Amino acid sequence: MPIRQENLRAEGSKGESVAADFLEAKGCRILDRNFHSRYGEIDLIYLDNSTLCFGEVKYRKSDRKGYPAEAVTRKKQGTISRVSDYYRMKNGLGEDLRYRFDVIGIDGNGVEWLKNAFEYIPPK
């Protein structure tokens, strides 16, 4: 089982690198990769012009099991929302800062960048 987990991590890391390169080519500035807190993790944090973006990267070899972006469940959206709160607080970023949640899907057909893929989900 550990070998499978290592393979998944390696594929995920490769997907995140592809996504970061894609975003940089589109003019974004990567601020953080794999940002961790006790609430969870965000794959990529970047600036798209003056908007702070929290990006979830989903990689699939093919779309046989669904499109990559479909794998970002409501639970995962809540986790990303909570981690984004922590990131903004930790970095002293004000309430007036524009931010959004993106999904970067990667499959055999290329990269799909879904800007503003979901809305903020407040903690319960």
Image: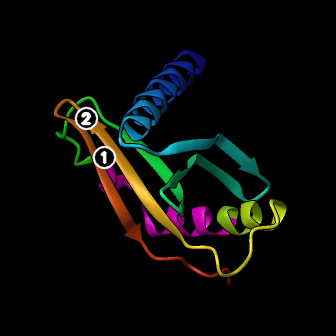
Using a 10 Å C-alpha cutoff, classify the residue at mark 1 as few (fewer than 14 neighbours), some (14 to 19) or many (20 or more). many
CB-based contact (under 8 Å), mark 2 and mark 1: yes
Image colouring: rainbow
Number of numbered labels in the structure image: 2
Q: Position of residue 82 (x, y in %)?
A: 67, 68
Q: Quadrant of the N terminus?
A: top right
Q: Look at the picture and state if 41 lies above or below 77.
A: above
> For the residue labelled by badge 2, is the local secondary structure a helix, a strand or a loop?
strand
Q: Residue at x 37, y 65 (%)?
A: 117
Q: Residue at x 60, y 69 (%)?
A: 81
Q: Mark 1 sits on what residue? A: 68
Q: How far separated are the C-alphas under marks 2 and 1?
A: 7 Å
- 95 or 116: which is nearer to us? 95
Q: Amino acid at mark 2?
A: Asp
Q: Look at the picture and state if 36 lies above or below 59.
A: below
> For the residue labelled by badge 1, is the local secondary structure a helix, a strand or a loop?
helix
Q: Look at the picture and state if 67 lies above or below 97.
A: above
Q: Residue at x 54, y 43 (%)?
A: 29
Would residue 14 appear left or right of 44 to someone viewing this image?
left
Q: Residue lying at the far top in this picture: please name it.
A: 3
Q: Position of residue 41 (x, y in %)?
A: 65, 50
- 48 or 86: which is nearer to us? 48
Q: Quadrant of the C terminus?
A: bottom right
The numbered mark, 2 or 1, whose residue comes first in the sequence reads: 1
Q: Quadrant of residue 14?
A: top left
Q: Look at the picture and state if 21 lies above or below 49.
A: above
- 1 or 52: which is nearer to us? 52
**How would you classify the magenta stretch by its main secondary structure?**
helix
Residues drawn in magenta? 68-82
Q: Quadrant of residue 109?
A: top left
Q: Amino acid at mark 1?
A: Pro
